[in-house]
Structure formats: C-alpha cells, structure tokens
Amino acid sequence: MKPKVLIFSGYGLNCEEETKYAFELAGAKGEIVHINDFIDGSKKLEGQILAFPGGFSYGDDTGSGNAFASKIKNHLWEKVLKFVEKDNLVIGICNGFQILTNLGLLPALDKKYGVREVALVHNDNARYTVRWVDLKIENNTPWFSGIKNISLPIAHGEGKFYAPPEIMNLLKKKKLISARYCHDEICKLQNLPANPNGSLDDIASITDETGRILGMMPHPERAIFFTQLPHWTYFKKKSAKGRSSYERKPIPKEGHGLQIFKNAINYFKK
Amino acid sequence: MNSRIEVCYKIPDARSRVRKNDFFSNGFNKKIKEVFIVDVYTINKDLTKTQLVQISSMLSNPVFQDVSLTNPFSQKKFNYAIEIGFLPGVTDNVGNTAKEAIEDLLKIKFKDQEGVFTSQITFIDGVITENEAHQIGLNMGNPLIQRIHIKNFKDFIKEKGMDIIVPKVNLQNKTQVTQVNLNVPDEELKIIGRQGIKNNDGTRRGPLALDLTYMKTIQNYFKKLKRNPTDIELESIAQTWSEHCKHTIFADPIDDIKDGLYETYIKKATDEIRKKKSAKGRSSSGRDFCVSVFLDNSGAIEFDQKYLITHKAETHNSPSALDPYGGAITGIVGVNRDAIGFGLGAKPIINIYGYCFGDIKINYPLYKDPHLKQKMLPPERIMKGVIDGVNSGGNCSGIPTPQGFVFFEKRYQGKPLVFVGTVGLIPKKIGKKLAYKKQAKSGDYIVVVGGRVGQDGIHGATFSSEALSTGSPATAVQIGDPITQKKLSDALVKEARDLNLYNSITDNGAGGLSCSVAEMAKESGGFEVELEKIPLKYPGLEPWQIWISESQERMTLAVPKNKWLKFKKLMEKRGVEATVIGEFTKSKKCLVTYKGKKIMNMEMDFLHDGLPKRPMKTSFTPPFHEEPHLKKNLNFNQITLDLIKKLNIASFEFISSQYDHEVQGGSVLKPLQGKGKINGEASVTKPLLNSKKAVALSQGIYPTYSDIDTYHMAACSIDTAIRNLIAVGVDPQKIALLDNFCWCSPDDPQKLGELKRAVAACYDYATSYGTPFISGKDSMFNDFKGYDEKGNAIKISIPPTLLVSSIGIMDDAEKTVSIDLKNPGDLIYLLGETYDETGGSEFFNLFGAVGNKVPKVDAKKNLKLYKALYRSISFGLITSSISVTRGGLAVALAKMAMAGMLGIKIKFNKPIHLFSESQGRIVVTINKKNKEKFEKMMKGNPITLLGKVTEEKKIIINNKDKKIINLDLSSVLKNYQSTFKNY
C-alpha cells in the first residue's frame, strides 16, 4: 500500500502542489489539507507522512513561520504530538522548516517537543536570496538515506541557522545536523560561496533525535526534473573529448531531489 | 489603554549591519559607529498583564530576541533614535498579522476601532547632528505614508523612550451625499473637472480629469433629468470615463482614422492574423491559437488540449513615483488579479517585470512645488523601492518572477515606468462550462471578497490620467497585501471556481467598485447596490469614497442566490471575508442606495457609452540629430568594456537573484544563465508538472529609438520580442504579443503623431510576422510638471515608450537552448545581416549622441530566417544561441563567452558594425560535425561563419588579420558585474 502524505496549506504557504507532486512521483498518495480543515475537524491528521511545505505563511510577519506555528499550537498541538510519537515521518521545507523550529518540533532535544531551541534568522545580506547550493549529508536520517552529496535550490529571506552555543554543542554531539552547505558542483560551476546565508556552522538541515522529523532550507521538490537543474542545457549539449557519446545518451528524467521523497516512501516498505 | 511591545535581536542583526552600510554609502561613514534596530508593536486595546505577557512571548523568539513590555530598549549610548511608523490608514501588513495572531492566541476579538500597529526604531550611535538625523529619517521613511519621529539621547532618557503613538484613522465626515451644481459657467465647469468637487470648506476633492467637452455632456444629461448630479454620480462617471479606464486616445478618431488607433491597427491586426491562421484549419501547426483576446482582464491563448494560458501586463507608474515600494507591490499584486479575474479565474503562474528609471548616477533634485518643500524621490531611491516592492509582492504570493528587464534614461526621473505582468493558467472547461466565459445573471448577488475599503487609492484612476504635479493626491498611494490576496486567490481559483459557485468574477482595480460592478453589470444589464453593506476599514468614509476607493485585494463576483451560503461558508473557512452588497439586475440602470436613500440613479448606457468622441489631430516632423564625430582610431577594447558595464547592458543579477523564479517547480531556463550567470533575454517555464510543454517569455523595448522615429522603434521592439523567443527555441507560429504604450504630452500633436506611427508599425509588423496582440494597455500621461533646484518651472516627459511582451508555447521544454558557449571548437555563426544602424544605440550613447540611422526591420526576410532556425533547433543542431540586442554584436558575443566561460576567436570585416543594433540577428554555435547539415538547413538565409569557440578564455576579434578586440574574459566579466556590485 502507498504511504499517505498530508501536506499543509493555507495562509500563504505556497509550495504544496509541487511537494505533493514530488511525493506522488516517488510513490506516495498525497493530499493537500488546508490548516483550517484540520482545525475544524473536517480532515484528520492521519497517514504516515506530514509535510510542511515552503511558502510565505503570514508573509513572514512577526518572524518567518511564527504566526503559522502559533496557530498550530493554539489548535492542533495535541494532534501533531500524537502524530510524531508514532513511527511516522515529518518534513519541513524552507518555510516549513521555520514553522517546525518555531513549534519546537526541531531539534526537540531529549525529545522535549514544544520548546524553541534554534532559529532561522535573516540572511546575512538581509535580502531574499534565490540560488542553488551544494549540500553534504551529515547524519543518517531516513530522509537522506543513501545520499552523500546533493545540489538543490534555495529561496529564502530568513534562512540563517542560529543556535546558542550550548544547543549547538548538543546538536553536534547528538548528530542532529543532517546537512551542511559545502563547496561542490554548483558552487564550482557558478563561482559561488558555499554558505548562502551565513548559517552557523554551514547548517542547512537538522533532524530531531529520532531522525524522523527533518527540517531543511533547500527545496528538494524543485529538483525532481532534469530540466530544473541550473546547468541542464550545458549537460545536454556538452560534448567534451572522450565524452562525445554523452550527447546521445537519453536525458535523465529525474532531478536528484526526488531521491529524498523516494527515501520517505522506502521507509515504510521496511 | 495602549500597550507598546518592543522586540530586538540579542545576537548580531543582519538588518542593522546592512542599514549601517547604507548609511555609509550615503556619506556617513565617519559619523556613524553603530546601528541598532528595535521592532515595535503598539496595541490599541485593553489587555491584562497576563495577556500582554502571552502576546510578548508570541511576538518574539527567545532563541535570538529579547522582548520588553515596560522598559524601552536602547543601546547604552547612542546619538539619535529614529522611529518610523505608518500614518493613519496606511496598510500595515505586519500589524494586521499580529492582530490576527493575538485574536487566535487569546480567543478574543478586536473591536472596529482597536488594532495593532507596527513601527521600527533605528538607534544611531555616532556624532550626527539633528539635521543629519532628519536627513537619515527621510532617507529611510517616506512622509507620504509614514511618520518619522526623532529623539536625541537626552530626551529619550528623560522621556523614558519613544512615545506611544496610535495611528488610528479619525474621520469627522458627516457621511452625507451632496448635490453638485452644474448650472455654472464653463469656467467653473473646467475647474470642477480639473480640481474636483468643492467641499464646504472651499477645498477641492481631487482631480476628476474631465475636460470641458465631458463636463458639458454631463451637464446636458442631468439637465434632461431635471436635476443636478450627486457627488457619487459625478465621481462615478469620472472613473468610468477616465483615460485610465476608457483609453480614449486609442479609441477616438485621430486624423482621418475614424475608428481610432486601437480598432484600426491593434485589433485589426489580430483579427486578420486569426482569420489567416483559421484558414489553415484546426489541425494545422500554424492554426489560430487565440481564444479570448481583448475581451477580459487578460488575453488567452491555447496551451494544450485542456488548458489555456493568459497574459497581461500593466503599469503602475504614478504611485511608484510617490511611494516606490507601495506602488510596485500594489502593481504586481494588482496584475495578479488580472489572471484571477480572467474568465472564471486563472491561476497566476508567472510574473514579469520591467523598470524604466532615471539615471541613478545623476543627482538632479526635482520638486513638486515652487517653494521647494516637496522633493521628488531620486532615481536610486525609486529603483530600490520598486525592486523591493516586486520582491515582496511576487515572492510572498508564491508566483515565480523569472522574466524582466531594467532600463535607465534620465528622462524617467520625473516619472519612472514600472511594468508588471502575470501569466495565468486555466482549464478550458470546468464541468460543462467554458471556463474562459463569464456571465453575471440578473438576480445574482453582487459579492465582494477580500480586503476592506478605506481611503487608500482614492482617485487613482483619474490621478494617473494626468501629469504628476503639486496636486497629486497622497491618498492615491496604497500598499499591497499579498497574503490577503493569496488567501483569496487560493480560495477562488483552487476551490470555489471548480465547485461552480459563481457566474462571473472581476478585479477591483482602478475606480474600485464603481468600475468593477458597473463593468460586470454589462453582462446582466444593470445593478443595484446598498452601499452601507460594504465592509470598511474604519468608519467615517463618505459614500462617494466607498464607491470609488481602490483599496486593494478585492474581487467582485456574481454569485447565484442558491449558492451564496455554500460560497460564504467556504470563504469563511479560508479566512476570506465575503459580503453581499447588492444584486445584478436587467433594469438598464445603475442604482446605488445608502441607508435606504437613492444616491445614484443613472442609465447604464450613459455611464458606459455617454462619453462624446474627441477627434484628435496629429502632426509629425522627423527630428534630426547631429551625427557624432568619432575618432578614426577608436579603442575597440575599451568601447566593449564601456558598453558591457553600461546601466542598460550590465548584469542585474542583484534583481534576478532576489526574485524567486523556481517556486511552483516549473523553471526550465532561468534568468541567470551559464557559469557566468548572465542575464538572458528570455526565460522558459513549465506550467504543468506532468507535461513537457512550456511557456517562453520575453520582451522588446527601445525608448531611445523614439528620438529618431517611433515607427522603427515599435518595429524593433516587436522584432526583438519575437526574436528573443526564437533564440531559445520557440516556433515562430506560436508566439503572441502584448502592447504597453507609455506616452507623454498627448495634447501635443507631434507626440500624437509619433504615437500614430508607432501603432501603425504594430499593425504592419504583427501581421507580417503573424504574431497577434492578445492584450494591451496604455498610460498616456507620463509627464512631470514641477520645479528644479532654483524654483524654475520645468516639465520632464519620458521618451515615448512601447513595451512589447512576447509569449510563446513550446512543445518540448527539453529543446530549450541557452546562451552559454559549451564546447571549444564549436563554430560560431551570425544569422542575419548587419548594417550601419547605430542611431539611438548604446554605442552612440557612450558619446552622448543619438544619430539618425535607427535600425529598420525586414520582417519577411527575418521570418524566413526564424523558421529555418527553429527547424535547426528542433533537430538538435544548435548548442547555444543568443539574440543580438542592445549593444550589438560585440556585447552579444561577450555575453555568450562569459556565460560559458570559454573564449571566442572570430573575424569581422567592418569594426564599427560590431556595435550596430541592426535587428533580425541571432548568434548561434554548432558542433563542427554538423556544419554541412546546418548550412543546408539555413540555405537561402544570410548566415556568416564568424569563427570558433576556444579553450583560451579570451575574446579575440580580428579585422583583416589585425586584432581589433583582444580581451581577457575575466576582465569583461568583472566589468559586466561591476555596475550593480554594491546593490
């Protein structure tokens, strides 16, 4: 049976459709649910995977992810806790990651869910920034299973990861840092710095202690097709010496971000 | 009781650092040491201590922020504190969110007059004077919409911080309807038309922009009715008849053209193209793809068997001159509603932008008044604000913004042009209904959804139908609220539309309800509105204000009575306010009542079609410009570098990289291409995740060519807009165009003559290329009338500007060709011919010259070439391609090289032609093994093998074995990126 993914929408979240598409392409059954439908009970918080997609909930007013998290706390907190206590998966992408940190679902040290311990603050350039980044996978969350390096796009104004020193030490000690920005393929190609926003310790993604709850600033759902890559036209027409056959190879249909969604589906096949 | 909650960072705040750098670049580097920002929420409501503690904790994040309820934050020492907050009635998005979050947190409701208001304090530690503090305050805030409150350290300590200020709107209006006496001499009629209805205190309400001909027509109409009009009736007519809404300059007779420019040239071109294409039959590849053109808020073409693509571009010039951020965000969010308001509602899927600013390197202060009190914002400030506004509007709405341009010319200093556009996606059918058709029926409820009505944006339509001058109303300024609109948009186009809950929908833009209701009532035949039912932001609005206010984020719908409850419930569940304000009728009457009293009672026919035609006469004298005397031994290396860093050619990566172009997952060809991240001319986006089909977008704009001949200016803009799409791989038979005319001085026969020539070119070239116009808009009054530094009256008019936006449908996104060179050894070809056409070019501009040899377009020759190139691309022969535009061939080659970080080595015979801007040219590269195949495919077209791509990172151009250009790629790239490096 296909695992069921519920994807939050409403109040300015805006990546729900492509996130649902990515999950379905990877083999899940997806449903987009408006937060108010959870609140009034017309939709149940069920299934195996819960996704907080990217977007601009409440326009980032009062701090990115803050107002949406507050709404969840006011109305859905018990239900969300129940969901995460099961052997389920949760992902927060970009604005979703900001919501998860405001909810205290990440990093939830000692599994104390509900306390704000880390934050995503204004980028060092104090400006919304759109580009591609290279990531090095750092822990063994099921979400990143089998991936060592991956390049994905970012688009955010408040993505600088911050944690006070004592929390930072615990994140490292408990191996909760799941991905760091690094200088790899895309950065070399376009001559870009590795860290796009000034994140402490180059942190792009963290998990809770179970590894089942993941937050990440980059957008894997925007890297599921070959044609989404920033250099796909280059690959397609590149015919360097000794690789002249490359041109004739069929174009891969996938972008590497899809693997993250496949991993989530595979988690429930075990 | 008012409470003040202050929040500040306890870790380094990037905003403070960036602000400090801004101050430094404004010359305060020696006077300012530190900058510190505190965010303030002022709550106007009785709350308990416990409640306030709860609120404080919600509005701040303990991980990195401190929050205070009682003690004001400040640095231990500082020089001045500058607090900036909104003036009463200005949209405060953060304040509104905070209010909503507090209501949700405490399960309480704010009453009508209660609210949350945000402000921000900037503490400056340094040695600035009070005057300088005021100057900094004015650089950060805008007195038109914001209060700027300054305190020095001593007063701050003495008075225990800044003051609690609640920007509550307090209107003392009696909310009465007055009669306007039109039985007055013509002189008085003129004044009413120009300055507005007289208030009791003698002041005027602001421009109606009705000239004497119109005023006399209105006078006669009411004479027949044996009464005077009410203020709301006169205001309503003014909105509906405004140039902004009726486009009379395009509609009225001009010289011997009886049916006007629009019918005779623009619409006729489209009609003829459609007829010709239809003759090819439905299955042919070149068949007519237009579905709904010039009828609705956007134009629509066929995308695939199930979907249509809509497109529309707008301008928001006058408001952006006064409040660049507010003007631009309102513009982009507003044009999104042209998608949402198309048919039964299209989903906005791509935004485009285009900016024409004054020269940011020139500092030449302008004033609105002779006493030099009201200073116009300088071009750089306008640029930053506009860029920010579209950033917020586009990004917050979750709509990708991949395509745009920026153009600088000193004559845009008085009035910048801010173009914004939105592409939408809509299924052809919803159930059995055609989704691109709408029909309000008699008996349907008139329903408004979205934002509430305030005084913001009153007289926007009539204001933009005049030159910018002292009388320009501050209430014309608005600030868009993308999140309110996002909720509205999602609830409509993702839910209500597909549940078939309404019969018609339109946007509330210029003229507010007065235009949207009256316009939609054409479908049913009349309307009746109960004005007191319209939800207001605050009490005290006069009826005429409610009717014409342009408060944003509102749509008007026709909802059948039996579907109202279901519709209302759905909107409530999505946090969207929906209100019945009246009923559509078939009475042929426009009826408005206020608290039971009839305050407007006019015939639909008069309101819509009562305006008399005003024939226009034009003249045209071709201008002559001195040809520049160029040195014999020009330094071509230096010229190339100078061109590449020109404002109109240099990298605007700083804009592209702050506008999300990947959201919705459809990005194919991004705004920055290749290793060098070069701004391309076109972008490609896949609107449906499960389809290979794509939409390609581009534009053409050559304002400086207007100085020579607007006919060729328009021809070049059209050719460029088309060619830019051809270069990325679009089929020339699947391209449609939008026209946006921004003109000046329409009372000057010469300017009208120039307009006529430009529009005639639109007909000639659209029909020659077979590319229909599907939507368009014009803005005719782009003049600034004010004063210079010495108090001398001056008028600055923009160069006549035509933006041609192009949209093309691609069958296979994977056929897209990018501009970057890819393989050393690839052959470089120039397609098309180069002539001595340097008039109006960037090259001549380097020498301060205009010249006379403006590029001319041979559409027949070009189309043949474009078709051949399309075939070559379809066969996969082209490895890279670039359309030759501003700056000419040398610039195009340099961009290809920088994008691929590979060199070029070519031969070129006429050095000066490297900078000619001749149209119809594309540079392509191919793998040398495809030489024969390619040349065969291009046979019969002018193509030139220029040279090849090299491993060595150099641009080498030889003329008869002499190196005329020999540049290191790194230095070219450095120049290209240098212009906007610090933005």
Image (cartoon, rainbow, N blue to C red):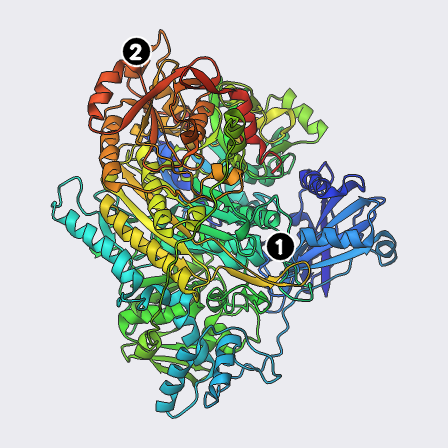
Q: How many marks?
A: 2
Q: Residue at x 62, y 29 (%)?
A: A199
- Asked if B269 appears above or below B646 in the picture, the reply is below
Classify mark 2: helix, strand or loop.
Answer: helix
**The C terminus of chain B, quarter of image:** top right
Q: Amino acid at mark 1?
A: Leu
Q: Chain of mark 1?
A: B
Vertical side of B508 occupied by B626: above or below: above
Q: Callout 1 environment at 10 Å: few (<14), some (14 to 19), or many (20+)?
A: many
Going by the image, does A87 lie left or right of B871? Answer: right
Work out whether disc 2 and disc 1 sit on a shared chain.
Answer: no
Res B90 quadrant in image: bottom right
Nearest the camera: B142 or B121? B142
Query: Residue flagged by tag 2: what amino acid is it?
Result: Ser
Q: Label 2, on which residue?
A: A245
| Quadrant housing the N terminus of chain B | bottom right
Residue B649: percent from left, percent from top? 49, 36
Q: Residue furthest bottom?
A: B226
Coordinates of residue B332 in the picture (x, y in percent): 46, 52
**Pointer 1: what residue?**
B377
Q: Residue B518 bears which disc, if any?
A: none
Residue B909's spot in the image, x, y percent?
Answer: 38, 23
Q: Secondary structure at mark 1?
A: loop
